[in-house]
Amino acid sequence: LCSTVGPILLCSMRDAAGMQWSVGSFSVAAELTAGRFLGVWIAAAAMSSSVGLLNAFVCTSARAVEVLAAQGMLPPSLRAPPEPSSRGGTALLFTGGVVVCLLCLPFRQLVELDMSLCACALGVEVLALLQLRRAEPHLDRPC
């Protein structure tokens, strides 16, 4: 809460109406309001937050790659060893490589790719629902 509300309150207390908002504006407004230390602190907090989000995304995506490989939908080399302590390094490297390749695309193409993949996923969900209704017509629906 403080990481979101704090910078917004600082910026609203400061006369930021004439300020042109862009990437890094919170850091600039914080520096103008409370000095260089707060501006650097907010920039560092934003960077560490972005690294954490990227780490969470890559790890969850790598787990999905492992599951798809275990089900035979992706090459078996991406499957994690069956030991409980396995890390699935191959899937992590694969997912990280895909992310690096996607970074080369312009933002507009990334958004279009994301929307296309979301539409495909929704289509697969609808087809799975129709198949389930056809295969199990008397199955109880959840409340």
Image: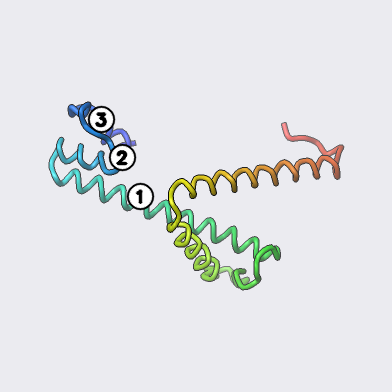
Please state which amino acid type lies under the numbered disc 2.
Ser
For the residues bearing labels 2 and 1, Cβ distance under 8 angstroms: yes
Camera-nearest residue between 97 and 113: 113
| Point 25% across, 45% down: residue | 42
Q: Which mark is residue 49?
A: 1
Residue 3 in percent (x, y) is at 31, 40
Relative to 34, 88 lies left or right = right
Give the structural element (helix, strand or loop) at label 2: helix
Give the structural element (helix, strand or loop) at label 1: helix
Q: Which mark is residue 102?
A: none
Marks 1/3: CA–CA distance: 20 Å
For marks 2 and 1, the one nearer the N-term is: 2
Marks 2/1: CA–CA distance: 10 Å
**Residue denoted by label 3:** 9
For marks 1 and 3, the one nearer the N-term is: 3
For the residues bearing labels 1 and 3, Cβ distance under 8 angstroms: no
